[in-house]
């Protein structure tokens, strides 16, 4: 299956989350790409009403590509807890409320695990998912999904990272994402997994 290749230097990152934009910028450095965020361009945030990470990623990338006239990349990612039937999942950001306070979101996960009895039973399997969608102004998209498995831990630990990082310990590691050095997290996380697929398909080194 052939994929459309990225060409040019400018890439709009369809996100207003600067933590996410920084990770994407770091991942694209060696490809000679200059990412600019949708927030910096003043682009509106589209309504994300898709039923999956992939659908929401495509909504965001297409909206940014059409509004800017440039190739755009979006990331739709989230935290999924097995005992909560995959919640918060595509609603991961919404669980943080209107102020995007992820301490509220993490506490809500713990509360719901307590309600189901899963926390006491040690049923704490969790995963991070990331869908990346590269969109062109003509409506073409290339979309890839990555994941990393691990477990929910409480209380939150670490000051690095963002979102649900302080309550996620990846399989085979003792540190949470928020306790890891950014480069160590970046080497193994869900975004890196999706990026490897995207890069292999659509990018050539500068």
Image: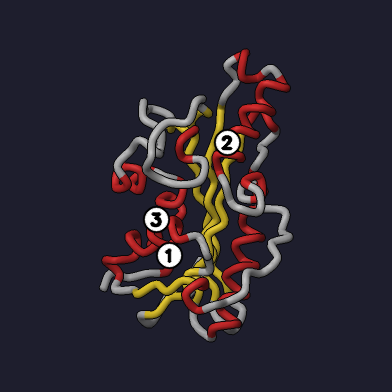
Residue 3 visible in the displayed image: no
- Identity of the residue drawn at 61% across and 50% down: 93
The residue pinned by badge 2 equals 106
Q: Residues within 10 Å of mark 3 (few under 14, many from 20)?
A: few
The secondary structure type at the circle numbered 2 is helix
The residue pinned by badge 1 equals 201
Identify the disc placed on residue 196.
Answer: 3
Alpha carbon distance from label 3 to label 2: 28 Å
- Identity of the residue drawn at 42% across and 74% down: 36
Residue 98 image point, x, y percent: 65, 54
Residue 106 image point, x, y percent: 57, 36
Residue 144 visible in the displayed image: yes
The secondary structure type at the circle numbered 1 is helix
Which residue lies most toward the top here? 121
Residue 162 image point, x, y percent: 46, 47
Q: Nearer the viewer, mark 3 or mark 1?
A: 3
Q: Earlier in the sequence, mark 3 or mark 2?
A: 2
- Identity of the residue drawn at 43% across and 65% down: 201
Q: Where 164 falls versus 69 (above or below)?
A: above
Q: Where 171 falls versus 163 (above or below)?
A: above
């Amino acid at each position: 299956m052939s994929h459309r290749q990225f060409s040019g230097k400018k890439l709009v990152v369809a996100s207003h989350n600067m933590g996410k934009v920084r990770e994407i910028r770091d991942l694209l450095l060696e490809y000679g790409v200059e990412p600019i965020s949708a927030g910096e361009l003043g682009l509106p945030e589209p309504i994300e009403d898709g039923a999956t990470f992939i659908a929401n990623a495509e909504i965001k990338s297409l909206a940014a590509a059409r509004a800017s006239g440039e190739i755009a990349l979006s990331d739709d990612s989230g935290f999924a807890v097995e005992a909560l039937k995959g919640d918060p999942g595509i609603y991961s950001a919404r669980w943080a409320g209107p102020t995007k306070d992820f301490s509220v979101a993490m506490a809500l996960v713990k509360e719901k695990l307590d309600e189901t009895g899963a926390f006491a039973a040690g049923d704490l399997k969790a995963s991070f998912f990331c869908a990346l969608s590269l969109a062109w102004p003509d409506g073409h998209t290339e979309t890839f999904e990555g994941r990393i498995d691990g477990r929910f831990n409480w209380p939150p630990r670490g000051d690095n990272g963002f979102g649900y990082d302080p309550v996620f310990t990846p399989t085979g590691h003792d540190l949470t994402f928020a306790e890891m050095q950014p480069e160590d997290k970046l080497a193994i996380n869900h975004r890196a997994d999706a990026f490897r697929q995207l890069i292999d398909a659509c990018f050539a080194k500068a």
